[in-house]
Image (tube, helix red, strand yellow):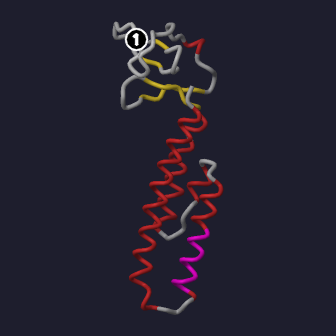
Amino acid sequence: MFICNECGRVTEDDGAEFCHFCGSDKGTTATPTMMPEGYEAVPIKTGGVVYADRSKLRRIPIALLLAFIPGLFDIFGLGHFVIGRWVKGAGFLALSGGYYYLRYMSGWDMLAPYLFIISLAIFVVQMVDLYNGFKKMLNDSVL
């Protein structure tokens, strides 16, 4: 395995003299002593691996569960708190409060079909935003 001196990506030894990601000459051979404590290899779509912070990787399943399961009951934003996106989590939680107020306190039963569509839209937006938060969190923690 090689670590590129320019972009820091780790790639397998395929005999090429250049990095397939940035085009510069390949770096030195990767050894376990070069990898910092607490990082682990994560395969990427374009080939090779990157090294990401292990503690941040463990947050992903917890964030997904806290976004998906309460989201089914119209409680949004809990997964955002796990990955450290506090403002977005508070915003989605405030949307949940507004949704519950309109649904249960307003007494307008004629809004029920529209509120279901709004709830579904908020759920989808929350999950897409959480995915984008994962990408940002992993990009910030990659060597």
Number of marks in the rendered image: 1
For this rendering, which residue is in front, 18 or 50? 18
72 over 14 or under it: above or below: below
Indicate the secondary structure of the residue bearing disc 1.
loop
Q: Give the range drawn in magenta.
A: 94-104
101 over 49 or under it: above or below: below
For this rendering, which residue is in front, 48 or 66? 48
Name the residue beneath numbered marker 1.
18
Residue at horizontal 49%, vertical 15%? 4
Determine whether, in the image, residue 112 is placed left or right of residue 101: left
Q: Which amino acid does label 1 sit on?
A: Phe
For this rendering, which residue is in front, 15 or 64? 15
Label 1, residues with CA under 10 Å away: few <14, some 14-19, many ≥20: few
Residue at horizontal 52%, vertical 20%? 8
Determine whether, in the image, residue 86 is placed left or right of residue 21: right
Residue at horizontal 59%, vertical 13%? 34
Q: Check if residue 22 falls in the magenta segment.
A: no
Q: Check if residue 102 falls in the magenta segment.
A: yes
Q: Quadrant of the N terminus?
A: top left
Image position, residue 109 (x, y; %): 45, 91
Image position, residue 110 (x, y; %): 42, 91
Q: In which quarter of the image is the C terminus?
A: top right
Image position, residue 141 (x, y; %): 59, 33
Magenta part, dominant SS: helix
Residue at horizontal 45%, vertical 72%? 119
Determine whether, in the image, residue 114 is placed left or right of residue 3: left
46 over 4 or under it: above or below: below
Image position, residue 108 (x, y; %): 49, 92
